[in-house]
Each structure stands twice: as C-alpha cells, then as structure tokens.
Image: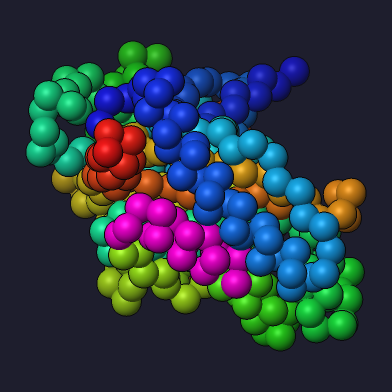
Amino acid sequence: MEKIINISTGEMAVGSDNSIIRTVGIGSCIVIAFYDEENRVGAMSHSLLPTRKKTKNPKIFPDKTKKSAKYVDEVIELMIDEIVAMGGKKENLKAKLVGGAKMFKILSGDKHGIGYRNIEAANQKLAVLGVPIESEATGGTVGRMAELNLGNGVLNIETKM
Amino acid sequence: MKNQLGKFEKDQLLEVVTVGAGNASSALSQMMEKRVNIEVPDAIVDDLENISSYIGDPDELITTILLKMSGEAPGFMLLMLPPQSALKLAGYLTKNYKKDVKILDEMDRSALREIGNIVTGNSITALSKFLNISIVQSIPEVVTDMMGSIVDSIVSEVGEETESVLVFRVNFSVEDHEIDGKLFFIFDPTSTEKILEITDDKLNK
C-alpha cells in the first residue's frame, strides 16, 4: 500500500519508498522535488516566496530564527538536511521544479511577478549547492498539481484548465 | 498590526465591509432585476500560507474576478464564483449560455469583467465615502483555475511586505441559490491600521 502525504502551501515532506507526496493549487508558488534514486529517498515542498524579507518593524514581526518551508532558499536547505538524515546522499540528488506561474496580468504590472522570482530563487540556490535540475514545468499562466512517487522518483503534474 | 484583532476592532472593520458589500449586492440586484441575499461578513487575520484553506478547497475549480485597489488603502477585491454560477452570470448578459467554463470565450469574460466593475465599483465607492479616503480600482481580470493557485498568487503579492493579511469574506446568492458567490476584500497590515485609525476617529467624535 502506498502512503499519500498531502502538503499545503508553506509545507514540505520527506519520505522513502512506498509513499507519494502530493500538493494541489500551485500558482505563483514553487514546488521543488528532490530524489535520490540510489537510496530511494526524496522530498517535496510548496513555497510561497523567494526569500525572507528583513522585517522593517521587528517588534511587530519578530525575525524567526527557524528556517521555514515558506521560503524557497530556506526550504531547499531544510529538505537536503532531512534527506541526508534519512540516509540519502546530497551528491545523488536531482531536483525538479513545478509552478511559478503568472496567474493574473494585473499583479506586478509588466514587471516579472512573484512566480518568475520564485523560479529564479530556486535556480540560484540549487546552482550554489551544486544540485542539478533534471526537469522543469514552470512559468505560464495555469495552476498545477504535483505528485512525487518516492518509489521511483517520478513526478506527475496535472492541470485543470 | 497585531496578529489578532480585538473583538471591538473586528466589529468596527466588519461594519465597514458590510457597507461595501451592501452596495455591491444592490448593484448586482439592480442589474439582474433579481433578489440578492448577502450573509453577515466574517474576517480573519492569518499568515499568508493559511489564507487559501480559509477561503475553500484548494483544488476546487473557481472563476475569479480580481481587482486591485490602490490609493490610501491598497488591497485586493475578489469575486469568486463556482463554475456553474459563472456560466449563468455570463450567460445572463451575453444571452449565450455555455456548458463548461473551459469554453468561456472573450465575450463571456468581458461580461464577467463588467459585472466585476459594477459590483466592486459600487462597493469601493461606498467604502471610500464612508472612510473619506481615496481608493482607486484597477481594471478587472477574470481567471478560472484551482482556488489554491489563485489565492496563493494574490496573497504572495501582499507577502512581499508582510507575514500576515486581513481577509473579509461575504457570501452572497442570487434568488434561492440560483447563483452563489463570495466576495473577498484583502488588506495588508498598513491598510488595516489606516482603516482602524479612521474608524476610531469617527467613533470618538
């Protein structure tokens, strides 16, 4: 029996063999999937923003020291740590990216939207850490859902429109 | 902004939204010549990533008419319609009823945008009169997709500046649930503070 782990926005999950990590409603958010084929360990996240912003008013929004799955750069580090803790190897990892769409034209005007910046943030962080990107289904104007099979590393992507 | 609104502050803000929503529903009612019922609005302040689960089922297909508010209280206004309601509403104006939201054409989207303009325009005018501030609305945009994709894309725009947002929800229906929909107002903390300040002043006069 396969175990299905559902994650929502701002969350991540790690697992091995016989499990599936699933997330729906991906718009400008970015989903990053990692898989170590040799050890059959993987992880997937659903992040909202490229990076944490230094708060202007630390009294109202204290800077949390804990890394959060909400941010692309932080979640990549979190996932790699957890994969290694589960017996995976960083050098075996391959990444897949999903999301980063621009759902509305009126958001961000003519500038690159959050979606684009999420894709960019993921590319940069992965390049720094030396993790290759195996495939990408990013950009565009359509929402997606994604399912990572931890038995074989296959990532299924669906759209509704 | 605090992460939680006091009961008094919440009532104050809900009063403001009721004014806006009341005007929106009477505009819709006049246009369709049908009775429009609105429910009592509710409000939450929460972290960005939790907003879509407050709004509904993230993988449900939904038609959204989005308008951006700028000026003294920036934010967003959304009209969300389940596909069946969007089809009926568009068909009501175009007199050409479609069976699937996937085949809504430019004519239908234009009809929905017009509805967005009328409904939200009335509500924004009421809000800015009540608060005595200027709010400018953008042109509306219509998108049908998964609710989660839509909501996250909108709140992440606010998320550039803050960790949490204020969301108001008003459910409405046209004549015995022939058409159901939800109206949302989303404000960032700066706008919320501003609105509270103004209503405070009004109450203390």
Task: Please say which color scheme the image uses.
Answer: rainbow
Measured from the top left, where is residue A15 in percent x and y? Answer: 50, 21
Q: Is residue B35 magenta?
A: no
| Residue depicted at x 79% and y 79% | B93
Provide the residue span drawn in magenta: B118-133
Q: Is residue A25 above or below residue A60?
A: below
Residue A10 showing in the rendered view: no
Measured from the top left, where is residue B111 in percent x and y? Answer: 69, 79
| Nearer to us in this view, B59 or A46 | B59
| Residue depicted at x 56% and y 33% | B42
Residue B15 showing in the rendered view: yes
**For this view, does A111 lie left or right of residue B173?**
left
Task: Give the image quarter of residue A142.
Answer: bottom right
SS assignment for the magenta stretch, majority:
helix
Q: Is residue B129 magenta?
A: yes
Quadrant of the image containing the C terminus of chain A = bottom right
| Residue depicted at x 53% and y 29% | A7
| Residue depicted at x 35% and y 64% | B135
Task: Give the image quarter of residue A117.
Answer: bottom left
Quadrant of the image containing the N terminus of chain A = top right
Measured from the top left, where is residue A60 in percent x and y? Answer: 18, 27
Measured from the top left, where is residue A47 in percent x and y? Answer: 39, 40
Q: Give the number of marks.
A: 0
In this view, the residue farthest toward the front is B205
Q: Is residue B118 above or below residue B147?
A: below
**For this view, does B146 lie left or right of residue B12?**
right
